[in-house]
Image (cartoon, rainbow, N blue to C red):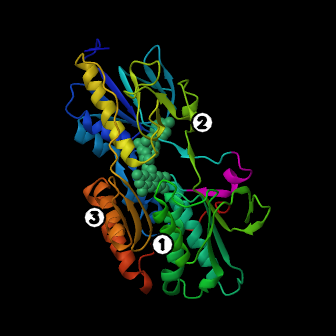
């Protein structure tokens, strides 16, 4: 629809999702002569890469959230809080959970993905996950309450934490929970005998951190084991029950807290939008990021599956796609043809724990250890949106790493409601 101007004025662009992709698209359209509306079910954007720090009591949940209102004000756009439940493609309207709808001339779908349990019996009922701020605080409160219980003199049992999935989320969580036990426990929970707290990481593949080079994968495994994490490779979880996990070998292992970090899929609701979907429910797009067969609907971020160019579900592809989708809308509006999306690989990184991370950059550049950890930390603090967030996250992380052996660096949570563990 080149140069479209509706009866009411300039074209309406709806951006669905205030994550990496949605906010980048919003920023890219800041000076465009268009009426841009950002829609999200939350009134904030979540910085997922630091959720594991919230879950392990190093950051507050406010440190990883950026208000959607601030983002739209800076971009000259408007914000609508609501859950997208449907799209009326013929009438060009997105439908919201409260029964209202929003008209669009161009639509960018950037609603991300969520935890997928792949039908493993009991996983959805008995596992915690780490995808939202709420997930992170639930996990933190479960961990802290379990340690409190363990401190009570009358209790003589141990605490087993199982993390399922050896990707970046599983590795960083296992490493930090182990450090919480090794470093923070003696000072913060002196009554707890460290040897009674067990941290286990279960991965069905041959190695941890699959997208990395073998030497870095091996380094990550060694670093976790050095921290006392029991790493089980080539081991799948067959079932999760209250208080235990069952491996495919049939072995039953005690597990008081089981965290599912083994995969993601598109939310069921998004799958019902009636758009062409591929593996994991990701929406299939052409090279210009428009949904196959649609001329005004773009997809960006974790949700997008580009024909012939499947990309990992990470922040960089999401940012670059968000920017590209917005640029194509500008081009269409100017009467120009769209351009294909080209991903620029800027490298990948993952952290294992304090002073331990792996970095893999283009042209064979690799780093590990303290330097990689400082690079990881610096980049994540820079990428974190908002001046206040950056400062509080920096202070809280510095406080954690400087003081946790002396009883600092553990943010107090609330007791979870009964049944949350
Ligand atoms: C724990 C964790 C750690 C990670 N660590 C890293 C890392 O270190 N490096 C890295 O590159 N990547 C990392 N990732 C992946 C990275 O965070 C994602 O690839 C990225 O967030 C995807 O961006 P997105 O914009 O597609 O979606 P998201 O950032 O997930 O944003 C989607 C937005 O859509 C909203 N939404 C969803 N459904 C609806 C609906 N129906 N209606 C309205 N709004 C909706 C959500 O509230 C959310 O705000 C991590 C992910 C997790 C979970």
* Boundaries of the magenta span: 119-129
User: Which residue is labeled 3 in the image?
Assistant: 391
Mark nearer the N terminus (3 vs 2):
2
Q: CA distance from mark 3 to mark 1?
A: 20 Å
Q: Residue at 62% across / 60% down in the picture? A: 203
Mark nearer the N terminus (3 vs 1):
3
Quadrant, the N terminus: top left
Q: Secondary structure at mark 3?
A: helix
* Contact flag, marks 1 and 2 (Cβ < 8 Å): no
The answer to whether 78 is drawn above or below residue 234 in the figure is above
Residue 365: which quarter of the image? bottom left
Q: Is mark 2 within 8 Å of ligand 1?
A: no
Q: Position of residue 195 (x, y in %)?
A: 63, 84
Q: Residue at 27% across / 34% down in the picture? A: 77
Q: Position of residue 45 (x, y in %)?
A: 39, 47
Residue 400: which quarter of the image? bottom left
Quadrant, the C terminus: bottom right
User: Which residue is labeled 1 in the image?
Assistant: 412
For the residues carrying marks 3 and 2, which lies nearer the camera in this image?
A: 2
The answer to whether 265 is drawn above or below residue 233 in the figure is above
Q: Secondary structure at mark 2?
A: helix
Q: Residue at 39% across / 72% down in the picture? A: 369
Q: Is residue 113 left or right of residue 150?
A: left
């Amino acid at each position: 629809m080149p140069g479209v101007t509706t009866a009411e004025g300039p074209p309406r662009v709806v951006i669905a999702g205030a994550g990496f992709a949605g906010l980048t698209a919003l920023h890219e359209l800041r000076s465009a002569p268009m009426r841009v509306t950002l829609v999200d079910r939350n009134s904030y954007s979540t910085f997922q890469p630091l959720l594991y720090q919230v879950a392990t009591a190093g950051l507050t949940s406010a440190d990883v959230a950026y208000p959607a209102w601030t983002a739209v004000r800076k971009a000259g756009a408007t914000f609508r809080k609501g859950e997208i439940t449907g799209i009326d493609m013929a009438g060009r309207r997105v439908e919201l959970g409260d029964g209202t709808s929003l008209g669009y001339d161009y639509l960018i779908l950037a609603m991300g993905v969520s935890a997928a349990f792949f039908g493993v019996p009991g996983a959805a009922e008995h596992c915690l996950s780490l995808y939202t701020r709420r997930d992170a605080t639930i996990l933190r409160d479960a961990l802290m309450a379990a340690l409190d219980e363990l401190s009570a003199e009358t209790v003589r049992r141990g605490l087993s934490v199982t993390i399922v999935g050896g990707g970046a989320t599983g590795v960083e969580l296992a490493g930090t929970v182990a450090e919480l036990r090794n470093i923070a426990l003696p000072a913060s929970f002196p009554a707890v005998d460290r040897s009674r707290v067990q941290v286990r990481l279960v991965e069905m593949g041959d190695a941890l951190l699959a997208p990395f080079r073998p030497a870095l994968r091996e380094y990550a495994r060694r670093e976790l084991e050095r921290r006392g994490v029991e790493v089980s490779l080539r081991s799948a979880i067959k079932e999760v029950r209250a208080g235990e996990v069952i491996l495919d070998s049939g072995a039953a292992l005690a597990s008081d807290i089981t965290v599912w970090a083994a995969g993601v899929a598109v939310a069921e609701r998004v799958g019902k939008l009636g758009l062409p979907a591929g593996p994991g429910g990701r929406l299939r797009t052409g090279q210009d990021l428009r949904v196959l067969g649609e001329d005004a609907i773009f997809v960006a971020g974790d949700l997008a599956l580009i024909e012939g160019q499947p990309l990992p579900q990470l922040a960089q592809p999401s940012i670059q796609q968000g920017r590209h989708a917005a640029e194509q809308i500008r081009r269409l509006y100017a009467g120009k043809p769209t351009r294909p999306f080209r991903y620029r690989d800027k490298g990948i990184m993952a952290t294992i724990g304090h002073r331990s991370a792996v970095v893999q950059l283009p042209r064979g550049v690799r780093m590990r250890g303290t330097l990689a950890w400082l690079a990881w930390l610096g980049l994540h603090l820079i990428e974190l949106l908002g001046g206040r967030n950056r400062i509080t996250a920096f202070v809280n992380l510095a406080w954690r790493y400087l003081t946790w052996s002396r009883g600092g660096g553990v943010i107090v949570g609330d007791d979870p409601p009964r049944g949350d563990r």
